[in-house]
Amino acid sequence: FKYCKCKDKIIFVTKEDHETPSSAELVEEDPNDPYEEQGLILPSGEINWNCPCLGGMASGPCGTEFKDAFSCFHYSKEEVKGSDCLEQFRTMQECLQRYPELYPKEDDAPSSQASEESASAEPSDPAAGSEKDSDPTLPNTESSAES
């Protein structure tokens, strides 16, 4: 269960509540609210650790390791961006492996199992299999048999 400091409030209403005009007052959004959706990078150039796009990685049990690795990559000045961050990413990976129930490997995820099953079903099409398996450097046995 992930903890979320959400800006939204859920209110349940009845059919009767919908029959009367709303008396709700709209409040202008506060641009300085750290929980507003401002994207991954704030206007200041800093990382928005509250961005939902991070999927809670910054606040989980490996949050510190994730922040170290992501910050290193974001602020990296190397020609190959992030090439100076290998140790931070290695440390983060080791932490993720200590919590397999929270951070499953991609091949353990249910969606990848479905895509593997569909991939294994594709070669059963004989036309598709012959196209995939044919090597353009080898002679075509069907056309050479006809000549």
Image (tube, rainbow, N blue to C red):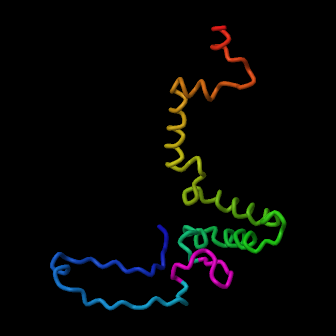
Q: Residue at x 66, y 24 (%)?
A: 134
Q: Residue at x 73, y 20 (%)?
A: 138
**Vertical order, 43 against 81 (above or below):** below
Foreground pick, 63 / 123: 123
Residue 93 picture quarter: bottom right
**Vertical order, 134 against 79 (above or below):** above
Q: Give how far across and how far down residue 110 sits, in percent.
A: 50, 48
Q: Residue at x 79, y 71 (%)?
A: 76
84 left or right of 52?
right
Q: Main SS type for the magenta part?
A: loop
**Vertical order, 103 against 120 (above or below):** below
123 left or right of 14?
right
Q: Give how far across and how far down residue 40 sits, in percent.
A: 61, 74
Foreground pick, 7 / 39: 39
Residue at the right extreme?
79
Q: Give the quarter of the figure containing the C terminus.
A: top right
Foreground pick, 44 / 128: 128
- What's the magenta region? 35-49
Is residue 46 highlighted in magenta?
yes
